[in-house]
Image (cartoon, helix red, strand yellow):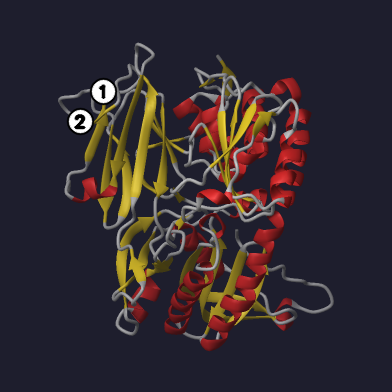
Amino acid sequence: MLLTAVLPSWGRSTRQIMQRRLAAIVHADLAGFTRMMEGAETRTFRHLKSAQIEVWRPAIDVGRGRLVGTAGDAMLAEFGSAVSAVSAAIDIQERMARFNEALNEDQRMLFRIGVHLGEVIIDDEDQNIFGDGVNLAARIQAIAEPGGIAVSRAVRDLVELRVEYAFHDGGEHQLKNVSRSVQVFHVRPARQAPGTTTRMVPQITLRFEGPDSAGRKHLFEVALDKLVGQPQGLFIGRGADQCELVVPHPTVSRRHAKLSLAGEALQVEDLGSTNGTFVNGERIKRTTLKEGDRVLIGTSIIKVVLADSLAVVPSSRPRVTKPAMSRNQVRGMAGSLDEIPLPDLLQLLGSSKKTGVLVLETDLHMGKLHLDKGRVHFAAVNDHYDVAPEKSFYRILTWEDGTFDMEQPEEREFPSEIEMSTEGLLMEAMRQLDEVKRLGPELPPHSAQLEMCSPLIPPLRDLTPDQLDILQIAHNYSRVETVLNKSLAGDVRTSELIVKLIKLGYLKVI
């Protein structure tokens, strides 16, 4: 998001209301803000305001900078020196790492920060800043990794020997609406603080999936560390004798494209292929890839994913393990959901503060609700413990027939826990059920198979990031139930996106 200022011209001359000066500009934007707001709007807004008050303002004050403004998830500040600006950016990321320790993994806020030294125009009336310096800081910010800092060469040259951090060449970039290429550097910790984990290289994984000429699926993954040992790059194409990454499809040339590293920047280059290589819907010759980019080679859509932040971040909190309870903490009870609806059953177990596993079975599914003193703290369907427990709970609650049985607690590790009260879960489940009913027959059943339309007529560039995510998952996994499981968004939002992609002609039910 780009923060700009409007220059009023009424009542006074331009010369009277503006001035120019050299400033170090810090521009920040929250990665994944749209997804976080869709998942939990109120909570995300609260965390964002807390971060502004507890992290941003103190760090900027220490660096003797000025918080110019905030707009949504973006923040803009100016400093009198490049050293102060970079030091403040480092301080912000370190404070944010500590701030995130208290949050669940899906709630953590990772900011991209860009720093540039340039001339700005100051509006004397409201002290907003704008101009090329602000625009460049915003564009550089977009290149930074989530939780990381990117700076221009001008900043690097002034700061390199004055902070205890390293500056790694990220290559030259052709930035949007900027006529000249800009060299960008990524700020990396030069030393590691106790109790933190430093990721010095991006953990990038590319997942290739698509049908071959016989309609069968192919799949492979590429990790960045494989590229590190290949200075010539990795070749992608149909020819198994010429390429490390083989995509067996007639629309792919024998040697189609190449992945390589330029400094620490991941690049893709088309090698004169017949059908071309596309990034975010645009045909390219060579370009630098960033997180979230989609590369189309033949029928394979490849999403670039940074598995980890490049900033200094605290080590992940240990998985929660529920200790085994004594056998007298649960007394066996069984019955039919036809006789006792699940909401009533959960209220009964809650009032009696039962601890154990409520096992529910239908003709098609088996669900488990893990209870601790009457509160549901984890849920799973068909033993898929990698699916968000809230998702599993909401799905189980839609079951109107089947059997239930109360069993002893399980000794196992859970990747996360449900924090909401059981009463809150029941209310949210009812709301989601109403929303899904609203979609009606437009929503394919969970057992249905999805397929990307071929030929794909509407361009990928017209889709939002959330729509692209669901298109990617549907292309990779096909089954509606699996798409719902793999999606980071809730079932309602994912269902809405599936329906929208079908209507727009990107997906079809097969």
For label 1, the SS is: loop
- Which amino acid type is marked by label 2? Cys
Label disc, if present, on residue 243 of the rendered structure: 2
Residue 132 in view, yes or no: no
User: Please, which residue is most extreme toward the top here?
Assistant: 214
The residue where tag 1 is placed is: 238
Residue drawn at 72 percent across, 41 percent down? 429
The answer to whether 474 appears left or right of 301 in the picture is right
Q: Residue 390 occupies which quadrant of the picture?
A: top right
Against 460, residue 187 (above or below) is below
The spot of residue 234 in percent (x, y) is 22, 39
Which one is nearer the viewer's eye here, 488 or 272?
488
Residue drawn at 68 percent across, 37 percent down? 492
The spot of residue 276 in percent (x, y) is 37, 28
The answer to whether 20 appears left or right of 225 in the picture is right
Q: CA distance from mark 2 to mark 1?
A: 8 Å
Badge 1: few (under 14), some or many (20 or more) residues near its Cα, within 10 Å?
Answer: many
